[in-house]
Amino acid sequence: MLSVKKHGVILEKTNNSFENKGAFNPAIMQEGNTVHILYRAVREGNFSSVGYCKLKGPMKVVERYKEPIFYPEKSYEHQGIEDPRITKIKDTYYLTYSAYDGINVFGAYATSKDLQTFDRKGIITPKFTFEEYSQLIKLNFEKINLMHLMFYNLFIRYKIADIMKDKIYIWDKNLVFFPEKIKGKFAVLHRLYPSIQILYFNDISELTVEFWKEYISNLQKHIVLIPKYKHENGHIGAGCPPIKTAKGWLIIYHSAQLTQEGYIYHACAALLDLKNPTMLISRLKQPLFSPIEPWELKGSVNNVVFPSGTALFDDELYIYYGAADSRVAVASINIHELLNELKI
């Protein structure tokens, strides 16, 4: 049985106006003994920006900014820059996030050379209404898990979108770059409900309407993981940036379990093929860890552990996660123990 250690909370909200309602869902970048944390900071009114702090070692906070390091500037993100992740490819940092305009959520990213200044690259996920997406996803019928069809069909059947008509679009969230190019292209995990898919591209100019029509019409070819177990019966989504190991890409992802009391969010793990990440090597049949501690059970959203970054110290893999949509907490596990558990 896997032994996961819960180390507790390392960041919470403060009296600073930009984070007086929450500090959670951290992006993590490890550089030697230093861990940079770029976390979702929420202020009154559910407006989100990105805060920054620095750790010495896996958990000791040595610096924390009193102002956001990255904040909404564009109309597509004016309500919030949410749930950041960060990956370094060569000498460039790639910060992905959910851009929220108050109605819609799109996946966007920015780049940086120093983790202090950021160059926005914009939205890279599709922009289709629920009806448009429903028509495209139906082209996968008999080739794809029916969960992909049911949600959007219900949305159309009960005319939920009629209230907003053409103003409401499908949500594509949980963008995470792989730390190196695959097949010569950028590789990005993302989540069109309810599974995890992979996107390849050289330049964002390629991601046209026609590109996305073709992509969604053949979505089954791009799926990395589909919900399979009881604790995944709601949906799953990419979590931490993939970790390259000799055995494959180790991914720590989240799952949402629908219960009578509402959703419970778990941390999960899987191993993907190094050359072709759509090939699943193995996945845990049970959650890696679940919300059982007080700081995970009660908060802005109860019963949530939301893994979004890792750091490796010796053989101990530290997993940083949002707890109850309110605070940043840390868990750890021996990486070899985890990889052995994922062996075929």
Image (cartoon, helix red, strand yellow):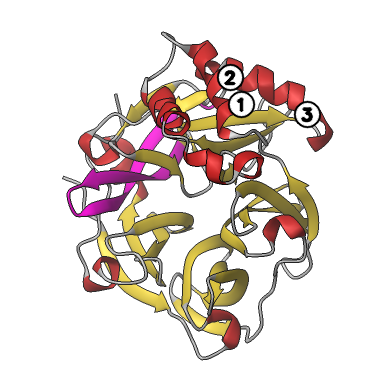
Q: Is residue 176 visible?
A: yes
The amino acid beneath tag 1 is Glu
Sooner in the amino-acid sequence: mark 2 or mark 3: 2
Magenta stretch encompasses residue 278: no
Q: Residue furthest bottom?
A: 15
**Nearer to us in this view, 186 or 68:** 68
Q: Which mark is residue 208?
A: 3
**Is 113 on the left-hand or right-hand side of 276?**
right
The image shows residue 114, relative to residue 277, as above or below, that is below
Could you tell me which secondary element the residue under label 2 belongs to? helix
What is the number of the mark on residue 136?
Answer: 2
> Could you tell me residue 114's position as x and y percent?
76, 66
- Estimate the x, y position of residue 29 in percent, counting from the top left: 59, 61
270 is within the stretch colored magenta: yes
- Say above or below: 19 vs 92: below
Foreground: 289 or 281? 289
**166 left or right, relative to 55:** right
**Quadrant where the C terminus lies?**
top left
Total numbered labels placed on residues in the image: 3
Q: CA distance from mark 1 to mark 3?
A: 15 Å
**Could you tell me the amino acid type at mark 2?**
Leu
Q: Mark 2 and mark 3: span between their CA atoms?
A: 15 Å
